[in-house]
Amino acid sequence: MNTVRKMPNQAGAICACLSLLTPRRHIEIAIAHNLACILVAPDLAKKYQAGEYPTIETIKDLRINVEKRFTALRKSIIYSFLYAVSILTVGLVLAVAFGKVHPMLSPDYGKVVTVFGTFLAGWGTLLGLNPPEASWKGTRLDQKVHFSVVRFLTIAGIALALFGAVWWQ
């Protein structure tokens, strides 16, 4: 009986981004995704179908690399968030010092939306300044997730900042 092994699939961007919340699940998705990217090569695909590839050592190496890159990606996201929060804090302290923000003043919701949008765009920019380790084709899951998160934060931030800027009361 001639059986064909099912080829692993590449992960979608939304699935990959959501998997960041659960490390074990992200690592499993990343191993399958990166293996699917490797199996694009016809010679490795034939070896895979014949059951000769991947070896146990290859899977162990993939797992070690994925875990290392996952840690680096989460650290990059957290550090860029903390930098953005510190910049926001400095801006708010200056606004309070100059009397532009005070609990006794009525809130300007347009400014609140603009500040939040600017925060998101700044976070996306800071994250984009620290990309993951490069690969030949840029198809690794950590690169795909990084690019998707940067794109989402930047686009959402710019949209909110523009919406807040044109807000009229």
Image: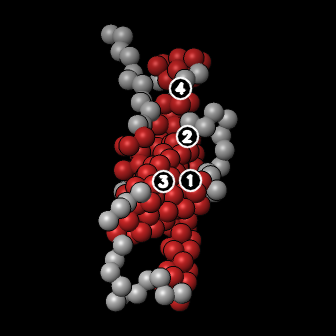
Distance from the alpha carbon under mark 4 to that under mark 1: 20 Å
Is tag 3's residue or tag 1's residue first in the polypeptide sequence?
Answer: 1
Please tell me whether residue 19 is drawn above or below residue 74 in the rendered image.
above
Type of residue at label 1?
Arg
Question: Mark 1 or mark 4, which is nearer the start of the sequence?
Answer: 4
Q: Is residue 23 above or below residue 93?
A: above
The amino acid type found where label 4 is placed reads Leu
The reply to whether callout 4 and callout 1 are in contact (CB within 8 Å) is no
Tell me where residue 74 appears, x and y as whole percent. 50, 60
**Amino acid identity at mark 3:** Ile
**Mark 2 and mark 4: Cα distance apart in space:** 13 Å
Q: What colouring does the structure picture have?
A: secondary structure
Callout 4 crowding tier (Cα within 10 Å): few <14, some 14–19, many ≥20:
many
Q: CA distance from mark 2 to mark 1?
A: 10 Å
List the residue tagged with mark 2.
140
Residue 166 appears in which quarter of the rendering?
A: bottom left
Residue 143, horizontal then vertical, whole percent: 56, 45
Q: Which residue is mark 1?
A: 69
Element under disc 2: loop
Quickly name the residue at label 3: 158
Of the 4 image quadrants, the one containing the C terminus is bottom left
Query: Foreground mark, 2 or 3?
Result: 3
Residue with the mark numbered 4: 39
Q: Amino acid at mark 2?
A: Arg
